[in-house]
Image (cartoon, rainbow, N blue to C red):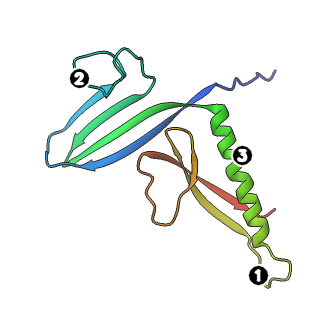
Amino acid sequence: MSEEIFTPNTIWIITEEVAETTTTTSETSTVRGARDSRDMGGIIGRKSAEEIVLTTEKGKVVITKRKPVEVTKLKEQMKGFLQAMREMLDEADEPDSKIQLDEVEVSVEINGEGQVSLLGIGGKAGGKGSMTFKFKRK
């Protein structure tokens, strides 16, 4: 028998940012929003669902964040993006044209808040997760 698949209320988005530094040590630390002696910028007493991992290696600091995003918000963003892509591709297919658009591949980025954006040529997905969609004519 087929088993029903449960849709979660939230999914995790993992983002990564890289910053230059002058040190050459290697260390990793994880911040989970717990209370301690370090200044966390106003989140004392508040439990954070975001997980932050700082890694310092070879002159760079890598900030990796794991943050929950509501599935309903991500669905709304994706629906809007896909609808806009459909409209643009329909407009690109002129009936009198001597050429026909057969396939389009686009990359999108999803930030820690679940916002979906088209990734431009030469763009960087720093601080964001990315996905690639391939639209092919039926």
Q: Residues within 10 Å of mark 1 (few under 14, many from 20)?
A: few
Q: Do the residues labelled 3 and 1 touch (CB within 8 Å)?
A: no
Q: Which residue is labeled 3 in the image?
A: 79
**Which is more toward the observer, 10 or 113?**
113
The kind of residue tagged 2 is Arg
In the shown orientation, is residue 100 left or right of residue 134? right
Secondary structure under the numbered disc 3 in the rendered image: helix
Secondary structure under the numbered disc 2 in the rendered image: loop
Q: Which residue is labeled 1 in the image?
A: 99
**Which is more toward the observer, 137 or 109?**
109
Whether residue 121 is situated above or below residue 33 in the rendered picture: below
Residue at the (65%, 44%) spot, across then down: 77
Residue at the (66%, 58%) spot, across then down: 134
| Distance from the alpha carbon under mark 2 to that under mark 3 | 41 Å
Q: Where is residue 24 in the image (x, y as percent from the top left)?
A: 14, 45
The kind of residue tagged 1 is Ile
The number of callouts visible is 3
In the shown orientation, is residue 99 left or right of residue 15? right
Earlier in the chain: of badge 2 and badge 1, it is: 2
Q: Where is residue 123 in the image (x, y as percent from the top left)?
A: 46, 61
Q: Where is residue 107 in the image (x, y as percent from the top left)?
A: 57, 57
Earlier in the chain: of badge 2 and badge 3, it is: 2
Whether residue 51 is situated above or below residue 76 in the rendered picture: above
Q: Position of residue 38 (x, y in %)?
A: 23, 23
In the shown orientation, is residue 102 left or right of residue 96? left
Secondary structure under the numbered disc 1 in the rendered image: loop
Whether residue 107 is situated above or below residue 70 in the rendered picture: below
- Assign the C terminus to one quadrant of the image: bottom right
Q: Which residue is labeled 2 in the image?
A: 38
The picture quadrant where one finds residue 42 is top left
